[in-house]
Image (cartoon, rainbow, N blue to C red):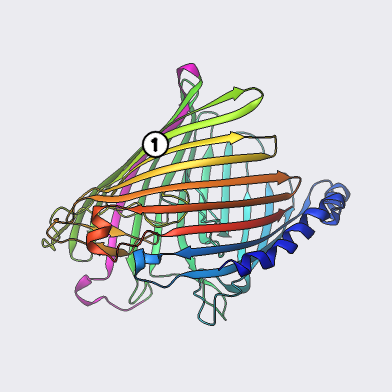
Amino acid sequence: MYRQALAIIPLLISSAAAQSWDPGSWIVNKVNQTTDEKLKFTFETRLRYESRTGNAFGKDVDVETGLERTCFGLSYNVTSWFKVSATAQDSHAPWYGANAPNSVRDELDLNEAYVGLFPSSKAGFGLRAGRMQLNYGDGRLIGKPNWSNVSRPYDHTAVQWRTKAAQFELLFLSPVKVRVGEFNRPVLGDRMWGTYDVFPNLFHKSLAEAYFLRRDQNRQGGFTGGTASAGTDKQDTNTVGIRSTGPLALNWNYTVEGILQNGKVGPANLNAGAWYSQLNRRWKIAGKLLDVSAEYKYASGTDNPSDTAHSGTFDQLYASNHNNFGKQDLFSWRNLRTVRGLISYGLTKNLSVTVAYFDFWLASARDGLYSFSGKQVARSVDGSAGTHVGREADLFGTYKYGHFSFGAGYGHFFTGQFVDKTTPGVGPAYMYIFHTYTL
């Protein structure tokens, strides 16, 4: 079963041996010194083997594959306030088969290409425009899914005004769709605009963020023409949220986020909401670091699916869900209540081991369970299947040395009543081993 995993072990060993002489690092440092830090190269190559069993709780076939991704870029600081940057990405999925989806493979293509105008001090005007990977807050609404073999950028424009007390930003973005065999382009039928504002020290050294985001979607005709039949594939929704993070007493730290949504999803009026809260603390025990965190997440669902005029199912927008709902990436932030506990222990300065535990419940018994991408995978219309989805346990470790990272992990999902009654009831399992070299 793990023949492919054994095949990449020599590659990992050879990569580790290369630590004694790192020509890539030498070249990058030399270029930076020669150009007074104006010209900078970036490079990342990642190789991962993964085995996934029990996909879609037994509905889909098991998958064993290798995932290769290489990114290389170049940025140039024309002046202290003007920057130009571009990055290419090449992704492959050996052993997957001839019909590998565009979520795991994409031939060499443009991943980032943008210009930036930045204020020369902590206050002033700023501008970004072009293709770029974006991450706002913790990435729960707008994020870059870096664990994916094909990371998702956005074509965007953002205008900023900074003061000593705040940063105000107006942004417009559209996600870029991977098109295997052709140039990747943005999805014109899916766009977002609004404001995302940050207040670094609003109170007691806490950071606060406030945002209003408008999402417009019309995939059939796009925004350049065409009409949707009866408006069933249109979406015009507003998302308003507040996020705050900072220190508490006794060296604890907190993060809270509350979100409200309204608007139209097809013919239905949307009224939805979500909540996130986390407590975390770091201890130093015998010279080793121990990190502990506990969190609760909630995203609303629809209580009456037969009422086509109203919807309460939260829209996760362009979320980066990896780790937020487990290493297996089974679920999204829709109609779900999640409790997570996590303990990470630094065995050495470079080696850490993490254990995570998740418990999942539906917010509404009559709404569905939604996959990582936001698609519905199961539903009990009358609510008779209950709300307990199941539990996931993850164990993984990471070793870092210089520009190299090595890691491995295993996760298993233990099915609950809802999954047992609405699917074949197979508990998914996920095993992976990876190596990354980053400059």
Asked whether, in this view, residue 195 is left or right of residue 284, the answer is: left
At 40% from the left and 64% from the top, the residue drawn is: 54
The percent coordinates of residue 27 (x first, y second) are 85, 55
Query: Could you say where residue 100 lies in the image, as x and y percent from the top left?
Result: 52, 76
Residue 99 vs residue 28: left or right?
Answer: left
Q: Nearer the viewer, residue 30 or 55?
A: 55
Is 245 within the magenta?
yes
Q: Which residues are magenta?
A: 225-250
The picture quadrant where one finds residue 349 is top right
Q: Nearer the viewer, residue 261 or 117?
A: 261
Q: Residue at x 68, y 58 (%)?
A: 85
Mark 1 nearby-residue class (10 Å; few <14, some 14–19, many ≥20)? some
**Residue 257, image quadrant:** top left
Q: Position of residue 118 (x, y in %)?
A: 63, 45
Label 1 amino acid?
Answer: Glu
Number of on-image labels: 1
Q: Residue sitting at 52 percent across and 46 percent down? A: 395
Residue located at (17% from left, 56% from top): 366
- Can residue 287 be seen here? The reply is yes
Residue 308 screen position, x and y as percent: 13, 63
Mark 1, residue position = 295
Up-down: is 160 above or below 343?
A: below
* Left or right: 409 in relation to 388: right
Q: Is residue 211 magenta?
A: no
Q: Is residue 110 visible?
A: no
